Amino acid sequence: MRFQTKKNHVIDLLFPIAVFFVFAVSALTVILLAANIYQSTTARSSENYTARTSLSYISEKIHQSDVEGGISIGTFDGRDSLILKQTYEGSLFCTYIYEDGGYLKELFVKDGTDASAQSGKNIIAVKSFSMESQKNGLFHFIVTDSQGETASVTVRERSSL
C-alpha cells in the first residue's frame, strides 16, 4: 500500500501571500481616503466657524442690547462701527463693534469717553466687516474671514416693532 503524499506547489505559497497583500493594500487605501475626507471636513468646518461665529456674535449682542434707540451704526475712531447703548446705574455706556487690524473688535466705554480703536478687545480674526442700516430697524452685516469666505446676516431689532 502506498501512501500518497501531497506535493507542494509554488501556488500553495503564493496565493495566501497575494491575498494578504490585496487585503493590506485595500486597508491602506481605505485609511488614506478616510484621512483625506476627515482633513477636508475639518478645514471646511474651520472656514465656516470664523465667518458664522462672528455673525452669530453680532446678532446676539444686538438682541441683548435691544432697547428703543439703543442700536445704531456710526463711526468710532474713523471706522464704521455697530454702536450699542446701555444704561447702567444711571450712566450711559456704549459698546462699539468694529474691524481693526484684521480682527473684529469690541470696546465697552462710558458714553463720551475718548478711546482709540486699538483699545478694543480682539474677538475673532476677519478680513473685512461691513454693515448697513436698512429701513424698519433692519441691520445687514457682511463678514469675510481670513480664508476669504464671506457670510452675511440681516438682523431686526425687536424694540422697533
Image (cartoon, rainbow, N blue to C red):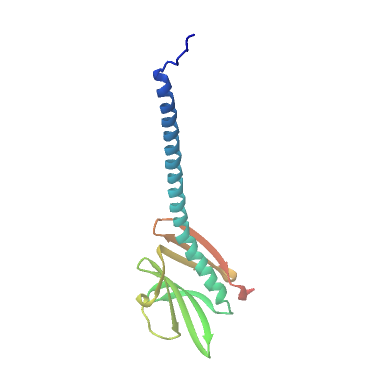
- In the rendered image, residue 147, in percent from the top left (x then y), is placed at 39, 56
- In the rendered image, residue 77, in percent from the top left (x then y), is placed at 38, 76
Instruction: Name the residue rendered at 58%, 72% in the picture.
Output: 157
Q: Residue furthest top?
A: 1
**In the foreground, 21 or 121:** 21
- In the rendered image, residue 103, in percent from the top left (x then y), is placed at 39, 67
What is the quadrant of residue 160 in the picture? Answer: bottom right
- In the rendered image, residue 116, in percent from the top left (x then y), is placed at 36, 78
Instruction: Name the residue rendered at 37%, 81% in the picture.
Output: 115
**In the foreground, 88 or 23:** 23
Instruction: Name the residue rendered at 45%, 53% in the picture.
Output: 42
> Does residue 15 lie above or below 92 as drawn?
above
Instruction: Name the residue rendered at 45%, 48% in the picture.
Output: 38
> Does residue 158 lie above or below 88 as drawn?
above
Q: Residue furthest right?
A: 161
> Does residue 45 lie above or below 68 as drawn?
above
Count all numbered tags in the image, as a single digit: 0
Quadrant in which the C terminus appears: bottom right
Q: Residue furthest front?
A: 1
> Does residue 30 lie above or below 114 as drawn?
above
What is the quadrant of residue 20 in the picture? Answer: top left
